[in-house]
Amino acid sequence: MVKILFIFTSHDQLLGDEKHEHPTGYYLSEAAHPYHEFKQAGYELVAASPKGGAVPLDKSSIEAGKDDDVCQQFLKNADSQEFVKNTKKLSDIDPKAEGFDAIFYPGGHGPCFDLPGDAHSQAIIRNVFESGRPVSAVCHAPIVLVDVKLSDGSYILKGRKATCFTNEEEEAVKMTKMIPYLPETRMIERGANFEKTEPWSPKVVVDKNGGILVTGQNPNSAEPLAKELIKLLA
């Protein structure tokens, strides 16, 4: 059976949000749709996060997903709720991710804070990538790649195609000053051959240069990214 490791954020507070007026976390549709597609494919799924336990959900994404049947099912289903409320501590996951066929990072603004600098996350990404297994992330989550270096000391993004939530999309939601840095800008600084499409349109980029990177631009890219990953794993 194919086995995928979901790596969630544990971060729930935006930059300068001391009053907690705008709690953040993972974005509902970016977890729900891949979860649904992978379950439909018969995959085994395991969830982890830096702190372990329940992971924070971006409340705005609940409103955004109110008419989305897959999102509503994810919120109401006992198995999917157990999945996000009882995650393993990331540091307890084998850094070589032995036994997993791929890793996937759901987006949301949360990953911008606690995952790029997480040494254990970096080690998992490097080891999975160098073993030829897919490393995938959607929307803001490709930010987890920006500080990952391969065994030869080069940045994983250098010279490789990738995408993420764009600067234009970030400006549209007026969140540019509430995260440490803009994912698109930092990915380009790390040498990525950045690709993008019109704001909110689905965009999935697959790079097979020395390993497999699968990145999606925005929430609407989560389902097609999952389907692309299923094709790769087949």
Image (cartoon, rainbow, N blue to C red):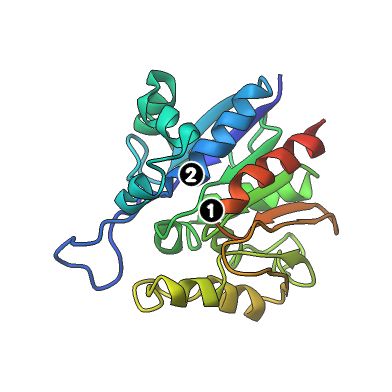
- Residue 134 seen from this side: yes
Mark 2 to mark 1 CA distance (whole Å):
6 Å
Q: Position of residue 229 (x, y in %)?
A: 73, 40
- The relative height of residue 165 versus residue 37 in the rendered view (above or below) is below
Which element is circle 2 on?
helix
Nearer to us in this view, 147 or 62 = 62
Query: Dot 2 corresponds to which residue?
Result: 29
Q: Position of residue 144 (x, y in %)?
A: 55, 59
Residue at figure coordinates x 67%, y 56% from the top left: 215
The quarter of the picture where the C terminus appears is top right
Query: Dot 1 corresponds to which residue?
Result: 219
Residue at figure coordinates x 38%, y 27% from the top left: 81
At label 1, the amino acid type is Pro
The quarter of the picture where the N terminus appears is top right
Looking at the rendering, which quadrant does residue 34 occupy?
top right
- Residue 96 seen from this side: no
Looking at the rendering, which quadrant does residue 203 occupy?
bottom right
Q: Position of residue 179 (x, y in %)?
A: 39, 71
Nearer to us in this view, 192 or 62 = 62
- The relative height of residue 178 versus residue 211 in the rendered view (above or below) is below
Nearer to us in this view, 90 or 58 = 58
- The relative height of residue 160 versus residue 71 in the rendered view (above or below) is below
Question: Horizontal placement of 6 versus 202: left or right?
Answer: left
- The relative height of residue 66 versus residue 45 in the rendered view (above or below) is below
N-terminal of the two: label 2 or label 1?
Answer: 2
Question: Horizontal placement of 114 versus 154: left or right?
Answer: left
Q: Position of residue 149 (x, y in %)?
A: 67, 64
At label 2, the amino acid type is Ser
Query: Is the residue under label 1 in contact with that under label 2 (CB below 8 Å)?
Result: yes
Residue at figure coordinates x 45%, y 74% from the top left: 172
Residue at figure coordinates x 38%, y 24% from the top left: 82
